[in-house]
Image: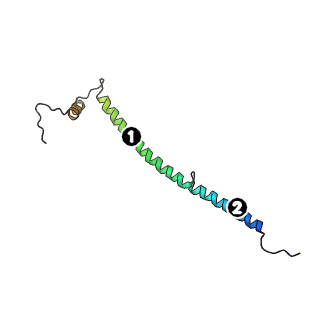
Amino acid sequence: MIRSTRPSFGALIFFAAAFAVGAYFTFAAVQGDYGLFRRVEIAAEANVLRADLDRLNSEIARIENLTHRLSDDYLDLDLLDQQARSMLGMLRADEIVIR
């Protein structure tokens, strides 16, 4: 009995299916919901959010400082004068306003 040297049709289907499954998992590992590209996007977004958090923390510290300076325990008269001028539009009698 002489066998042909061509691979059987079943082996060809098996290797084609194995290649398709491998290609699918490779694509999912790179571009899927949990892939490498998504991981880079999440890292970039985390850096932006950290910078935003730092900016907001510094703004909160500044506002807390201003609030403390206007509290009953510690009253900064210069800050009180500045706030009254900006909010109420008040002036002292000896000041001149140029528009």
What number of labels is visible?
A: 2
Relative depth, front residue between 30 and 94? 30
Q: Quadrant of residue 13?
A: bottom right
The three-letter code of the residue at mark 2 reads Ala
Q: Quadrant of residue 77?
A: top left
Q: Residues within 10 Å of mark 1 (few under 14, many from 20)?
A: few
Relative depth, front residue between 42 and 77? 42
Secondary element under disc 1, as helix, strand or loop, is: helix
Q: Position of residue 53 (x, y in %)?
A: 42, 42
Q: Label 1: which residue?
A: 56
Q: Is residue 73 left or right of residue 54?
A: left
Secondary element under disc 2, as helix, strand or loop, is: helix
Q: Residues within 10 Å of mark 2 (few under 14, many from 20)?
A: few
Q: Position of residue 55 (x, y in %)?
A: 38, 42
Which residue is at 74% across, 63% downward? Answer: 14
Q: Is residue 21 left or right of residue 99?
A: right
> Which mark identifies residue 18?
2
Which residue is at 12% across, 34% downward? Answer: 95
The three-letter code of the residue at mark 1 reads Leu
Relative depth, front residue between 46 and 65? 46
Up-down relation of residue 95 to residue 74 (above or below): below
Q: Quadrant of residue 21?
A: bottom right
Rendering colour mode: rainbow
Instruction: Report, in whole angstroms, how far the alpha carbon at label 2 lies from the one at label 1.
Output: 52 Å
Q: Position of residue 5 (x, y in %)?
A: 79, 75
Query: Which part of the image, by quadrant, shows the C terminus?
Result: top left
Query: Which part of the image, by quadrant, shows the N terminus?
Result: bottom right
Relative depth, front residue between 25 and 61? 25
**Front tag of 2 and 1:** 2
> Which mark identifies residue 44?
none
Mark 2 / mark 1, whichever is N-terminal: 2
Which residue is at 53% across, 55% downward? Answer: 37
